[in-house]
Image (cartoon, rainbow, N blue to C red):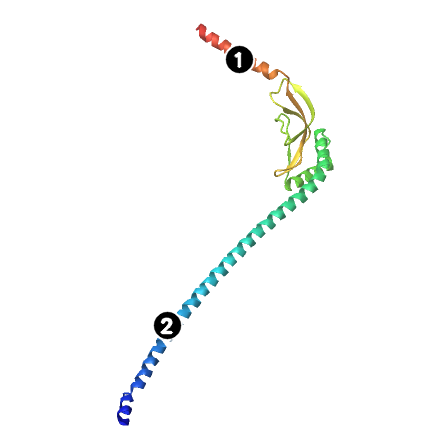
Amino acid sequence: MTEEKTTGDAKEPGADSAAKAEGAAEAPEAGASGAEGSAAKELAEARKGLAERTADLQRLQAEYQNYRKRVERDRVTVREIAVAALLENLLPVLDDIGRARDHDELTGGFKSVGESLESVASKLGLQQFGKQGEPFDPQLHEALMHSYSADVTETTCVQILQPGYKIGDRIIRPARVAVAEPEPGAAADAADATDDAAEAKGDGGDED
């Protein structure tokens, strides 16, 4: 009886070795699969990090460009304000030079100095404006005298008392002028005269 039990429980020779060999063969395959998954995960994380760093760099570059533009605008504005303040203090001198020229008193050394000063002011961007006969513009002109005239059809600058000055679009001083408006009723009279002429022309056409 003892011999039969012992014989029944005995394993076939080499069974343990075959099982171990099979397990050893499966282990490298599982390890290779796990390594590939880990590498793919690391690659995906690396790409995500690269995309984030690239976006940060682009955002930083855009902010820097905006900063440079803002600094340049501020620099130009500060320069314009400084130049305008300097030239504004020179306007009385330029007015004296202009009056001397109008009275034929701009001669000799004074003429040379005056013309040099005007040239420097022009190079700094100072522009004179205001001419007799141009329409009155409250954005450009300051009316110091007012009258009526039959020679104008709209409010007109009939005399330039002081020229205006500007730098670019910045008005340093409006032109100070004397203005004239059409005489009251002149526009209505002109309209009536035009209507009468048209009617007379029409009547002549009917007679024909």
Identify the residue position indicated by label 1 in the image: 195
Secondary structure beneath dot 1 equals: helix
Checking the image for residue 159, the label placed there is: none
- Which quarter of the rendered picture does the C terminus lie within? top left
Residue at 59%, 49% in the rendered image: 70
Residue at 42%, 70% in the rendered image: 38
The quarter holding residue 97 reads top right
Q: Is residue 89 above or below residue 195?
A: below
Residue at 53%, 53% in the rendered image: 62
Q: Is residue 2 above or below residue 110?
A: below
- Which quarter of the rendered picture does the N terminus lie within? bottom left
**How far apart are the two marked residues, 2 and 1, measured between alpha carbons?**
102 Å
Q: Position of residue 75 (x, y in %)?
A: 63, 48
User: Foreground mark, 2 or 1?
Assistant: 2
36 to the left or right of 60:
left
Sequence-wise first label, 2 or 1: 2
Checking the image for residue 33, the label placed there is: 2
The quarter holding residue 83 reads top right
The one of 153 and 29 positioned closer to us in this rendering: 29
Residue 66 at least partly seen: yes
The one of 73 and 41 positioned closer to us in this rendering: 41
Secondary structure beneath dot 2 equals: helix
Residue type at tag 1: Asp
Badge 2 local density, few (<14 within 10 Å), some, or many (20+)?
Answer: few
Residue 13 at least partly seen: no
